[in-house]
Structure formats: C-alpha cells, structure tokens
Image (tube, grey):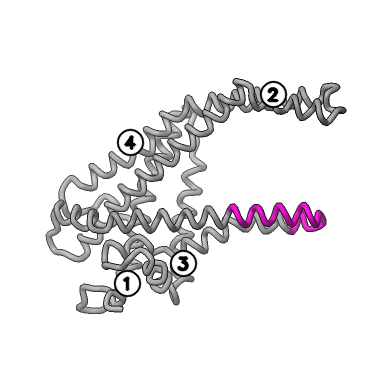
C-alpha cells in the first residue's frame, strides 16, 4: 500500500499526484487572503461587541438588543459573513475535487489488481461507470450525517437549557463526536469501492458496505488508526516559512490520501475475493 506512485498505465500516477497537489496546495494559497480578512473582521466584530457590553446600554435590555442588531447590520459584520461563506465554499470545492481525483486513483488501482495490462481507457471506464452512483450515494450519506448532527446538537442544547445540571455530561458527549465519526468511517469503509466493483444501487449500498466490514472492523480500525496517526504526525511539521510548511504538509497529505486508497482496495479484495475468483462474493446477492 505504500507504493502510492505505482500504477501500470504509464504517466497516470504522476499526473494524478500533480493534480491532487495543485488542488490541495493551490486552493490553500487561494484562500489565504480570505482567511486573513476573516481574522481581521472577527477581531473588529468582537471588539465592537465588547464595547457594547461595557457601555451604559448594557443595563437596558432594549437598548442592548438595538445595538447588537445595529452591529449585525453593519458593513463589518456583512464582510465577516461574506468571508465565511467564501472560505466554506472554497474548502468544500477542495474536498470535492480531492475526493473525485482520489476516487479515480482507487478505480485505477483496482484495475491494476484485476488485469495484467490495464490501460487508461480501462481506468476511465471503471471511474465513469461508477461516478453517478458514487456522487448520489455520498450526497445522501453526508447530508444524512449533517442532519443527524444538527438534530443531536439541538437536542443537547435543549437538554442543557432545561436541566443545567447536565451541562458537563452533555459536553462530555460532544467530545465523543470524533470517536463516533471514526466508528462510522470504519463501518462504511467500503462505501465507495463497491460502486467500482459491483452494480449495487445507491440505497442497497448502505447495507452492502456495512456488511462487508462486519466481522473485520477491529482490524479495519487498526489500519485506519495507522492512517490517522500519519496525518497527525504531518500536522506537526513546521518550518520558518509558512508557505514552505503549507507546501510540505499538502505534499505529504496527498501521499497519505493515495496510501489510504490503496489500503482500502487491498482490504476490500481480501474481504471479497476467493482463490481463483475475479468477482466479489456479494455481487450475486
């Protein structure tokens, strides 16, 4: 899985790597001015808010509310919201492009493992055939997670408001959110590769991908923890030049992303293939 640079079709891994690095590092450079503006606007809004709280208006609720509304209608607050939306938009675009490019790599590596001499056309056919279902499934998958997250957050806020004594217990549960996200990743680790290898539908893939990880989730979790630890080590890198730091981190993150895709493919094949078979056992179900 460490041979992230190795695909049988010549030139494909190099081009993919450059494209991934361009998306990872290039969009970070593009967003940097927006992030600087955002921090300035945040500080300005914070200072204005603190001035309101420390003024005589704080003693009168109606005047306090009026001043806060004026702050929210101010040009500075509008610029803050505009910068926030732009940063979120660029970040979302970056993640979408990284996911699509890495998904193409996953399909290409799967072709390499299945065929003696795969070509670029083989890579494209596998990718394009799976792409509509891949996009549809992930839209429903992540939209569902966002809805559940919002619902749980609202429920916890309501519990805290009604029973203040449970404040610390609710906060403890919130701190467990990364653990829950890790468990979800383990359960649905094969949610994307199934589209490349089978004709499974979007809705049926929820059951198929969860079933493929069943019985092997402890091993899968250990492998994913390895990837997480690599990412944590990368985030510790620091150089005198912030630009150099961003480039090195982006460079290594792309490598880890490709390694993870190869790891998923190898785990999937070990789970679905039997000696002498070229199709997963679950395809016929």
Of tags 4 and 3, which is closer to the observer?
Answer: 3
Residue nearest the observer in this picture, 106 or 90: 90
Image quadrant containing the C terminus: bottom left
C-alpha separation, residue under disc 4 versus residue under disc 2: 42 Å
- N-terminal label among 2 and 1: 2
**In the image, which is nearer the foreground, mark 4 or mark 2?**
2
Residues at marks 1 and 4, CA–CA distance in whole angstroms: 33 Å
The residue labelled by disc 4 is: 22
Q: Hey, which quadrant is residue 279 in on the image?
A: bottom left
Reading the image, the residue beneath label 3 is 187
Residue displayed at 83% across by 24% down: 57
178 lies above or below 285: above
* Among the two numbered marks 3 and 1 on one chain, the one whose residue lies closer to the N terminus: 3
Secondary-structure class at tag 3: helix
The reply, left or right, for residue 145 in relation to residue 210 is: right
Instruction: Please identify, in this view, whether the residue under mark 2 or under mark 3 is nearer the observer.
Output: 2
SS at circle 1: helix
Tag 1 residue: 270
Q: Main secondary structure of the magenta part?
A: helix
- Determine contact: label 2, label 1, CB under 8 Å: no
Residue 21 pos. (x, y %): 34, 39
Q: Is residue 260 left or right of residue 76?
A: left
Q: Which residue is mark 2?
A: 70
Stretch in magenta:
150-169
């Amino acid at each position: 899985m460490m041979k992230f640079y190795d695909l049988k079709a010549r030139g494909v891994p190099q081009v993919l790597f450059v494209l991934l690095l361009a998306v990872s590092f290039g969009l970070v450079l593009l967003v940097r001015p927006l992030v600087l503006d955002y921090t300035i606007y945040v500080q300005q809004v914070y200072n204005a808010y603190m001035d309101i709280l420390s003024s005589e208006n704080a003693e009168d609720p109606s005047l306090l509310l009026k001043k806060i509304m004026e702050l929210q209608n101010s040009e500075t607050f509008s610029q803050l919201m505009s910068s926030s939306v732009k940063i979120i938009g660029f970040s979302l675009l970056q993640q979408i492009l990284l996911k699509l490019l890495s998904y193409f790599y996953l399909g290409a590596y799967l072709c390499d493992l299945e065929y003696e001499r795969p070509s670029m056309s083989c890579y494209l056919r596998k990718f394009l055939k799976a792409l509509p279902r891949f996009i549809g499934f992930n839209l429903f998958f992540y939209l569902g997670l966002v809805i559940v997250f919002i619902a749980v957050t609202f429920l916890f806020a309501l519990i805290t408001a009604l029973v203040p004594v449970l404040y610390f217990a609710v906060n403890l549960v919130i701190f467990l959110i990364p653990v829950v996200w890790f468990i979800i990743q383990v359960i649905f680790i094969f949610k994307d590769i199934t589209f490349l290898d089978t004709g499974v539908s979007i809705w049926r893939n929820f059951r198929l991908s969860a079933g493929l990880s069943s019985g092997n989730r402890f091993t899968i979790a250990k492998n994913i923890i390895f990837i997480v630890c690599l990412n944590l080590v990368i985030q510790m890198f620091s150089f005198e030049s912030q630009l150099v730091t961003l480039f090195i981190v982006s460079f290594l993150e792309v490598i880890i992303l490709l390694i993870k895709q190869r790891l998923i493919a190898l785990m999937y094949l070990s789970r679905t293939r039997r000696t002498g078979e070229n199709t997963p056992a679950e395809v016929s179900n």
